[in-house]
Structures are given as C-alpha cells and as structure tokens.
Amino acid sequence: MAFLNDNYLKLKAGYLFPEIARRVNAFCEANPVGKARLIRCGIGDVTEPLPPAVIQAMHKALDEQASHNTFRGYGPEQGYSFLRQAIAQNDYRARGIAIADDEIFVSDGSKCDCGNILDILGHQNRTGIPDPVYPVYVDTNVMAGHTGAADDAGVYAELCYLPGNAENGFVPHPPASEKLDLAYLCFPNNPTGAVATHEQLKCWVDYALANDTLLLFDAAYEAYIQNPALPRSIYEIPGAQRCAIEFRSFSKNGGFTGVRCAFTVVPKELTARAADGNRVPLHGLWVRRTSTKFNGTSYIVQRGAEAIYSDEGRAQVKALVKHYMGNATLLREAATTIGLRVFGGENAPYIWARTPQDLGSWDFFDKMLHEANVVVTPGSGFGKAGEGYFRLSSFNSSENAIEVARRLKALV
Ligand code: PLP
C-alpha cells in the first residue's frame, strides 16, 4: 500500500468557502424571495470581460497555431522572451528598478507560484505569516510539512503569526525579538485592503537584511494602487533584490482569472543557505524547478498578457480598475455612513470593516444574508485576527455595488 503525505491530514477542512456555500444554499432553499434578491459581494473573482486588446492578441496567436510556418509547440518553461522583456521593461525598468528579463518567470498563476516556491525552500525555516491572510500561504506550508498540527482555532504550531489589527492598520510589524527565515507579505492586501508605505516596507527590508530573512512579496493587486506615493513593488526599497521574491498576476488587472497568467521575480543576487552552510543563488534552483515541473504557459495566453502592455491594453486595464475602484468607493462610503470602522477600499479592491455591535464575523455574515440578502466574507475565515471583521469585494457590476451600498445603509 502506498503511504500518503501525512501533512495533508493536518489541514483544517477547507472551511471558509464551503461553509459560506452551505449557509447560502440553506437560506435560498428556505427563502425563494430572498434567493431572487441575493447579491454575492464576497468573491475575489473578477466579473468584467477581458480587455479587447487581449482578445485581439489571443485571436491572432491562435491563428498562428493554424499554420505550419507559425505553429508553436512547447515553449520555454520560464516564459517567452517577448513577455519576459515586456514585464521587466514596463513593470520594473521603466520605474527605475533594475530587473533583467531572465529574472522574470512567467507562470499560469500566482496561486501556484506562492505554493510552488516552497519546493526550493527548506522545511527547517521559521516562517512568518500575517494574520489575517490569503489562506494559500498557510495551507501550502502545511502541505509541504513546514508546520506542526493545528489547534481548534486553526492556529498551526511552528508558524509565526504576524498579527494585523486596527492599531497597525493591518500592516504587521517585523517581530521585535524573533529571527524569521521566511516571511510572507501581501500588499495591496487580500483580505484587508491595506497597503504598506515605503517606510513600512523599508522596515521589513531592513529587518530581512539584518536577520537573513527571505521575503515572499505578493503584489497580485498592484494595479489597484491609486496613491502614487505608495510602493507598487518591494524592489522600490533599496536592498530588496538581496532579500525578496515578488509574485505578480494578470488575474486582477487584465481579468485573467480564467485565462491564467502570472509571473514571479527571482533576482540573481538572492541566495539561501544550503545544509553545508554555503550560500546558493535561488535563481538557478528556480530555473531548474520550472524546467523540471512545468512546460510553460500557453503561447496564446502569453501573447494576451503581452497586449496588456500595449497603449490600448494599458488604457483598457485602467478602465477596468476604475470600474472596480468605483464600486469600492461606493461600498466604503456606505459602510462608513452606517458607522462601521472601515479599512481598505482606497488602493485595493477589498473593503475590510469591523462588524457593528461587536458581532462575531459569522453572526454578521448571517445578518447580512438574512436581512440584506447580501453575501459577504467573514473575516475569521482569513485567520484568528480576522474575527469581528468582514470583507466586501468590489468585483461586481456597478448595479450590484450600488444596490449593496443601498442595502448596507438600510441595515438596522
Ligand atoms: N495572491 C492573492 C493575494 C490573491 O488574492 C490571489 C487570488 O485571489 C492570488 C494570489 C491568485 O492569483 P492567480 O489568479 O494569479 O492564481
């Protein structure tokens, strides 16, 4: 009989979204009228179609696949040079950040990248995880055997939780007295919508350089930053190329959640420690890992991603972001009007708010479902520190956002 990876048995059952679905289904069965009015405001998936420039580029690329002269089979595992160049040039070099084309690794999603990166990192690492958090960071560490067991509250032994709260504006500080080997950061943040300032990121980079910490910086929502003073990349902070990997995605700027394309930046200066004490560059290991376990993102998709950097593509992405941020403004304003303590929603598509009357996250979820017929995401689903909060997503049509804002204001 085959042995299994026992680490999977440590996982807490995928609790958040199945439990939301269970409660929503029970509500719909019992309330046909409520079911007809139901608006989902809890989902992190985009709602608007792909930008026309992307569609056009993908059609053209598909046509190329129809001819012997232009057909392409397996591509380079790390991505086609046309896309690596477009990314490095537009997202980094044009902003004064010296990233080389071959430091960009194109993939089929940031979710995979955030999990796959653990393939080249040791199980001994002391890992810092923000709380609340995008659950993928925690679960992939559990699967890789980098944690102990979970307690009843879902807190895993051997992880170092970095609490976000109203006091620190949901930007956790580096630990005062603990030396982390690895730390996850995500800005703009899912679920809290918080964005770290230059000073706050500099604290993390200084900590990382002083303590030999590798930062895993998830910038999937970078396109939502409206304030030009806020950093869009960890590499805006001097020294970060010696201590940080950055993850970016085309899911939330170009609407690629169903198309699948993202990238990871692994600077060549970045090293980690081998068991014999030698420092080894991570870049070569990541090349090796992608070459062995991945056969590249589809050519058609990479041409679509490239089109995001064209003049038309940029204008169309800007319009998409404007649409979602318009929703965010409405939702933020409605939650503020009814007296809630509100975070996020200004440089991020998520609004994070304290529940009224100190209701528990799930109690407020039920209240919204039954009284407003709106599905929100309970903050406790993102970690212990999320208890007493809820998340509203601005990924919706304008009509739905207007209606959710109206119903929120009518909530008693
Ligand atoms: N990182 C964060 C913080 C996310 O919220 C998400 C998706 O919701 C992802 C990564 C996943 O991105 P992708 O669609 O590229 O897998």
Image (cartoon, grey):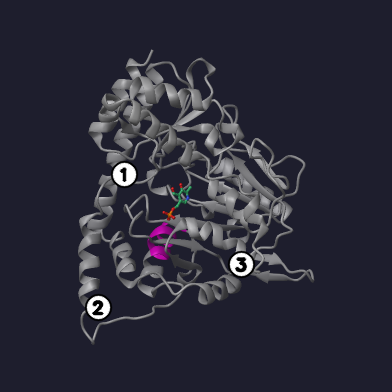
Callout 3: SS: loop
> What type is the residue that disc 3 sits on?
Glu
38 relative to 88 in the view: left or right: left
Q: Which residue is mark 3?
A: 269
Q: Are marks 2 and 1 in contact (CB under 8 Å)?
A: no
Q: Are marks 1 and 3 in contact (CB under 8 Å)?
A: no
Q: Which residue is mark 2?
A: 65
337 relative to 230 in the view: left or right: left
**Vertical comparison of 40 with 265: above or below:** above
Q: Which residue is mark 1?
A: 321
Q: Residue 67 location in percent, x, y?
A: 21, 83
Q: Residue 9 location in percent, x, y?
A: 64, 52
> What type is the residue that disc 2 sits on?
Gln
- Which image quadrant: the C terminus? top left
**Vertical comparison of 200 with 125: above or below:** above
Q: Residue 10 location in percent, x, y?
A: 65, 50
Q: Confirm whether residue 36 shows in the render.
A: yes
Q: Residue 94 location in percent, x, y?
A: 40, 59
